Amino acid sequence: MPQDNNTDTAIHKPLDEELQGQIYFDQNKVQSKAKSFYVESYGCAMNFADSEVVASILSKEGYTPTKELDNADLVFINTCSIREKAEETIKRRVFIFNKQKRKNPNLVIGILGCMAERLKSKWLDEDKLIDLVVGPDAYRDLPSLISNVQHGHKGINVLLSREETYADIEPLRLDNNSISAYISIMRGCDNMCSFCVVPFTRGRERSRNPYTIVAEAQDVFDRGYKEVLLLGQNVDSFKWQNPEDKTNTSFAQLLEMVARIHPTLRIRFSTSHPKDITDDVLYTIAKYKNICKHIHLPVQSGNSRILSLMKRTYDRPWFEERVNKIKEIIPNCSISSDIITGFCTETEEDHQDTLDVIKWANFSTSFMYFYSERPGTLAARKYEDDVPLETKKRRLAEVIKVQHAISLATNESNIGKVFEVLIDGDSKRSDQEFIGRTTQNIKVIFPKKEHINKGDYVHVKITSANSQTQRGIIVE
Ligand code: SAH
Ligand code: SF4
Ligand code: F3S
């Protein structure tokens, strides 16, 4: 799930910048009468993965994806409720889509994902221009809901499921420039952290049949992808029981099954939970070179009292023990994290503990946020949101500063060292340079060289660094 070291907007990645590529935009192949859909996704990687499930369902109905809002017959926004700011961003986008609908009254506007689930029919009550509201477990119903709309009715399905994993739906990859494919391995979350809306918007945790996961990973590898990102809100609690012989598959076993597909297929996964990550998982990561040496391990706070209020079910000593174990079993592993500042009752001393844990654990990067109260959560019902906004923001700025200093020191300490880098593609700034990532998920930028292409592994010697990236040159 992590995509950058940043604040609130880091995980918001509108797909319209990304949607390009051979299948959809080869204009010669697109029939002029084909109906098209436009989808914009917000929130975590699981939402982006879901948009690819939606795209697959729609393409079977004869719709083709477009990156032009103006050309679309259907417009979907796959929404996120994680923080108030995320919801505000989405409401602004819906306002733009409504403008579009005033120009083209036949346009169908659909709200998908977590905000659809959270606000349900309120969407339709409050905004007459919206046609469809579909929650994360109801995407199979899209064709019939769209047909209802075409017959003049509004469409809503926000039922959550205990079984749905979309295991049999082959996602339609929306970012064809990428060498990396998302694979959802589970859905929902049973943890009920007191600040978090996800259990309400995504429902109960359920794991997907591991054989369908391996088949999907094999398929993307055969189609030229070089990396798979296994996704779940808490991958360590992946558990699947074979209905025939009643044998269980754990996350460690799943990792091993995917790692064996091919030694050149890189495997990443997110998100790990400090309470659940097992030594078995760590030994499996250590055993296979192609399982990336990077664990995203959100700590949220460095203070045990706050962790207890957050209902994270671990305390600071437990977190430290898990980090020590990671460093012992996988010495070259990087650890990134998520941090919340200004949670209910957080004092300056508690906040100092958070600054301290970032330094102690030496996180490579973190996603950092100030606490945003979410309706319906335990924290909203039981605790007072008593840290003033300015204090939350000041603490967030301090957390970001400390994290950047740690990232910079780590990246600078790599100068002169050589890393294996998988090339993602051209760097943003120049088509004369590639960008790639090390197994530790550190970005590296370096000049191109003849006969070396996107998707290749190269050895790069680091020559300079900042807190976000390292620069280097290809060495033989
Ligand atoms: N399942 C993952 C987290 C998913 S949400 C885990 O347990 O680690 C991603 C991150 O958003 C969380 O780790 C947390 O840092 C942040 N977050 C969630 N709810 C929030 C809230 N109400 N206010 C601020 N940040 C929040
Ligand atoms: Fe939210 Fe906690 Fe579940 Fe993560 S583990 S999705 S923070 S409830
Ligand atoms: Fe947001 Fe839903 Fe993901 S609330 S972070 S899109 S699970």
Image: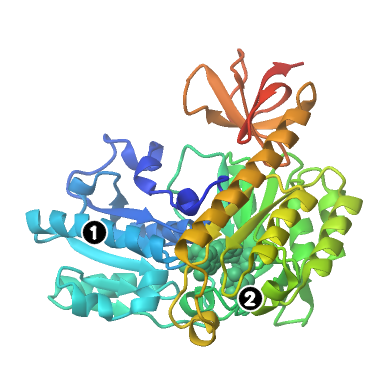
Residue found at the very far right of the displayed protein: 328
Q: Amino acid at mark 1?
A: Leu
Q: Residue 408, percent across and down?
A: 68, 35
CA distance separating discs 1 and 2: 40 Å
The outermost residue toward the bottom is 382
Q: Is residue 168 visible?
A: no
The N terminus lies in which quarter of the figure?
A: bottom right
Q: Residue furthest top?
A: 450
Eye-nearest disc, 1 or 2: 2
Q: Quadrant of ligand 1?
A: bottom right
In the depicted view, which residue is nearer to us: 337 or 124?
Answer: 337
- Which residue type does callout 2 highlight? Met
SS category of the residue bearing label 1: strand
- Quadrant in the rendering for residue 209: bottom right
> Is 342 or 167 nearer to us in this picture?
342
Counting from the top left corner in percent of width and height, residue 207 is at 63, 73
- In screen coordinates, is 193 left or right of 313? left
Residue found 34% across the figure and 57% down from its top: 89
Q: Which residue is mark 1?
A: 74
- The foreground one among 54 and 365 is 365
Say which label, 1 or 2, has the lower sequence index.
Answer: 1
Q: Is 462 on the left or on the right of 121, as rendered?
A: right
Q: Is residue 348 above or below residue 133?
A: above
- In the picture, measured across the screen, residue 306 lies left or right of residue 252, that is left
Residue under circle 2?
Answer: 310
Element at label 2? loop
Protein image colouring: rainbow
Packing grade of label 1 (10 A; few <14, some 14-19, many >=20) is many
Q: Is 114 displayed left or right of 443 in the figure?
A: left
